[in-house]
Every structure is written in C-alpha cells, then in structure tokens.
Amino acid sequence: MKKHTRFVGLDVHAATIAVAVAEGGRDGEVRSLGKIPNRPESVRKLVKKLRAGCDELRVCYEAGPCGYALYWQLTELGVECVVIAPTLVPKKSGDRVKTDRLDAEKLARCFRSGDLTAVWVPDKAHEALRDLVRARLAAKKDQLRARHRLSKFLLRLGRRPPQEVKAWGAKYMAWVRALAFEFKPQEAAFSDYLNEVDHARDRIARLESAIDASIETAPESLRAVIAGLQALRGVAKLTAVTTAVEVGTFSRFEHPRQLMGYSGAVPSEYSSGGSTKRFAITHAGNSHLRHVIIEAAWAYRFRPSVTGKLRERQRGLSAEVNAIGLKAQHRLHERYVRMLAKGKLKQKVVTAIGRELLGFMWAIGKQVEKEVAASQRVKQPAAA
C-alpha cells in the first residue's frame, strides 16, 4: 500500500502561526488551515490533528527571529521538521500580493515539490554557546559606541590627550579620569559617558570569562576544533570560538567553496552569454562569521613566522594541523603581496584573503573532526 505523506508549511510570527497543508502526490490538494497562537500547547494540538489520516507528517518553516524553539518542540513530538532558508524560497516575478496564508501555502507546495533549501539547525547546547558568543559581539559594538560618544564629547570641548598617549590605554584612561569641567551640566554628561565606557568594559570581561568556562565544559569535538583553528595566524581563542559555533560541523560542507558561500564573502556575479561581470561580495551569508575571518585576514600582511603566542597555541596539535597553518601563512601572504602589486584596494585584498582563509579553516576543521572520530573509535573497545 502506498504511503500517504502530508506536507505542512508554517508561516511563523511572534504571536501567531499560519498553517497550510499539501497532501501527498503531485496534484494533491493544498489548503489553508488558518492561524493558531504561537504557543506550545497550540502546536501540540495541531500536530495531533494533522497526524490523523496520514502515515507521515513533514513540517517546514522559514528561519527567522523566532529561532529554533518550534523545531525542537516538533522534533521532540516525533515530527520531521525542516527549517528553510527564506532567501532561497522560489518567487514568481508576477506575485504582487503577500499574506500569511499565501506564504504558508507556498511553503507547503514548494516543500512537497522539493524546491526548498534547508538550513543547518544546531542542538540546544550548541545554540546556547552561540548565544553567549554573540552577546559578547554585541557588547563590543556597544563599547565602541560608548567610546565614540565620550571621545567626541571631549573633542567638542577641545580636550585632547598628549600626543604620546595611545587611545583607550591605561595612560589615556588615567588622563580622562583626571579631567575637570567648569560647568555642572558638562560634569554630569562627562560622568555618564565615562560610566558607560566602564560598564561596557566590565560587561565584556564577564562575557569572556563565561565563554572560557563554557569551552571547558563543551563536547570534546568542539574543544578540539577550537584548539585546531588557533594553529592559524590571526585566529586566537575568541575568533576560533566564533568560527566554530557559527559553522557548526565543518564536514557538512563537501567543498571549501560552500563554506565561503555560507559566509557571504564571495563576489556577486551577473553573466550572460559571453559577458561576465563580478561585483562586490554578496553579504548573503553569516555576518558574524564574515566579520571575524576578515578581521583575522589582516594578520597575513606580515611575513610568515611562527613565534610567541602562535607557537604556544600550536603546542599539542597534530603535525597535519600545524602544517596546514604554516601553508596558510605562506600562501595568503604571497597572495596579499601579489594583489597589492596589481594595484588592488587594500580592503578588497584583505576580503579576498579572508575568503581563502576560510578554505584553510575548513581543512583544519575536517582534519580535527577526523582525528576526534578516530580517537573515539579507539576508546570504545577499551570501554567495553
């Protein structure tokens, strides 16, 4: 007997979920079931209702600000759920009407025909660490804003530090704290700006301490990948952690170009016939990953060397991983020099270096994951 599958499209919002169903078969009926509250009890009732009269229930919804809570709930209820990349949902050029009902019906129809692209969904523990890493990134952005407000306030009043004092260092902060103002309103504004700078500093310190503690209790595979990525120049602990939590499992990418595309650091292109035109990077990818790899790429301006902190980070890693790190230094520095010699803009050169750096990260990630899997296979018979 042929198995009857029911495909469900959900248009998820903070308060409501629009539901549509596509019955199995190419010409099966596609119908809307209206809206339900976005609450766990409502979702449970919906699943119970949809399971009646079908052998298999498959559900999809678009990735968005509501996160993966719905995915985890449906998975725990034994429902196959897929989270869809919203930018890759097929669209007709003639569509001029958009409603929640039509969006849900489109998802159900495209899900049945296999035209949707799924995104990788982390487990709850991985998502928790990623939330912590992103909280630190948000704190760094807030710190930059707080520093800008204070420095521009002092600039407006003509208060400038001695030329030999480096901005935001210990001597600079001592100079700032020693400032006095003639008028009380300015004193109050200065005090508020300074308190925000101090608050941002303390906030970042707390978050970085929490990240260190979380890494120690993370799964062995994640800790190994974080350590392995630090074999690369310009990739210290925080960059390695950010890369690991944003990418997830490196082996899910069959080729490094797929990881580069995931970061959004690949150039956009418009080609037709014999004409090929390439433009700025697409930015259609993980912005957190793109930010850290481009920042790390600036380290490849310098000649290859393994000294100091980099040598310390490489201690204890496998020879294969360290060899990849050294190869990255030579290749990326040579490419940086070669592209600059062609007259390329420095920022564009660094972006290209960052994109290629992801390829070396992919190679290290795959190597480390293979080493961890091999060590676990060796441990299993011993444990038995």
Image: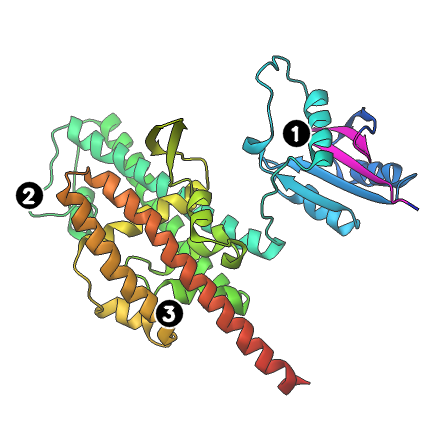
Query: What residue span does the magenta drawing correspond to?
Result: 2-26
Q: Which residue is mark 1?
A: 13
| Foreground pick, 313 / 261 | 261
Quadrant of the image for the C terminus? bottom right
What amino acid does circle 1 point to?
His
The answer to whether mark 3 and mark 2 are in CB contact below 8 A is no
Q: Which mark is residue 163?
A: 2
What amino acid does circle 3 point to?
Val
Can residue 174 be seen here? The reply is no
Picture quarter containing residue 88? top right
Residue 358 located left or right of residue 340: right
**Upstream in sequence: badge 1 or badge 2:** 1
| Foreground pick, 38 / 167 | 38
How far, Cα to Cα, is label 1 from label 3? 44 Å
Q: Position of residue 223 (x, y in %)?
A: 48, 66
Picture quarter containing residue 48? top right
Element class at badge 3: helix
Element class at badge 1: loop
Residue 40 located left or right of residue 264: right
Q: Which residue is mark 3?
A: 321
Element class at badge 2: loop
Residue projecting furthest to the left: 163
